[in-house]
Amino acid sequence: MQKYEFETERLEIRLIKYEDKELFTNLYCDPKTMKKIASPFTEEQANKCFDKVMKMKGAGIPKQLMWVVILKDSDEKIGIQSLTFNVDVDINVAEVGIMLNRSSHGKSIPEEAVLGLLHLGFEKLNLNAIYAKCSSTNFSTLRVIRKLGFKKDTSEVSDRESYVIKSI
């Protein structure tokens, strides 16, 4: 699993571990973090979701890979990001997701973390396309994905905006 871990200028990004459960739960239960994503989870829901993520991590062909985003200069865990695969349709396509704690907002961390994940996805995982989906009112996420070169995907009808990138 070492090949799935990477660094950027300011970030260490490693696969999620059992010791990251508190970070995961805090993010999924925080109403402000979840505001533009979904309803916040209860602690029980977050714990079940975490257990599911950890179970998928050990699967042969995982449906999702999840990483913890850590600031190099302080070793502070500031968020999680993931690639979710629709293995029944196309193993070479994934959807990116990221959630960061509120203290890391406004510091260009999502751009740096997702760009690192795009490099991993295209260069090491040989993905053909990576999607990003979000609410049309999630202006922060829309700004990040557009800045990274994602283009609007009009082939999918959904209640969320869909963007795709096919190379970097």
Image (spheres, helix red, strand yellow):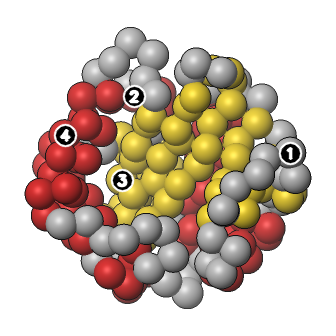
Mark found first going from the N terminus, 3 or 4: 4
* Three-letter amino acid code of the residue under disc 1: Ser
The residue under label 4 is 51
Query: Which residue is rendered at x = 72% and y = 63% of the image?
Result: 161
User: In front of the other: label 3 or label 4?
Assistant: 4
* Three-letter amino acid code of the residue under disc 2: Gln
Secondary structure found at label 2: helix
Query: Which residue is rendered at x = 43% and y = 68% of the image?
Result: 38
| Residue nearest the viewer, comparing 53 with 113 | 53
Query: Which residue is rendered at x = 26% and y = 59% of the image?
Result: 24
Mark found first going from the N terminus, 4 or 1: 4
* Three-letter amino acid code of the residue under disc 3: Val
Mark found first going from the N terminus, 2 or 3: 2
Relative to 104, say whether 74 is above or below. Answer: above
Q: Rounded to the nearest whole Å, what is the CA distance between mark 3 and mark 4?
A: 15 Å
Horizontal relation, residue 30 to residue 8: left or right: left
User: Is residue 168 in sight in this rendering?
Assistant: no
Mark found first going from the N terminus, 4 or 2: 2
The residue under label 3 is 68
Q: Are marks 1 and 2 in contact (CB under 8 Å)?
A: no
Relative to 31, say whether 113 is above or below. Answer: above
Q: Are marks 4 and 1 in contact (CB under 8 Å)?
A: no
Q: Which mark is residue 2?
A: 2
Horizontal relation, residue 129 to residue 153: left or right: left
User: In front of the other: label 1 or label 3?
Assistant: 1
Secondary structure found at label 1: loop
The crowd level at tag 2 (other Cα within 10 Å; few <14, some 14-19, many 20+) is few
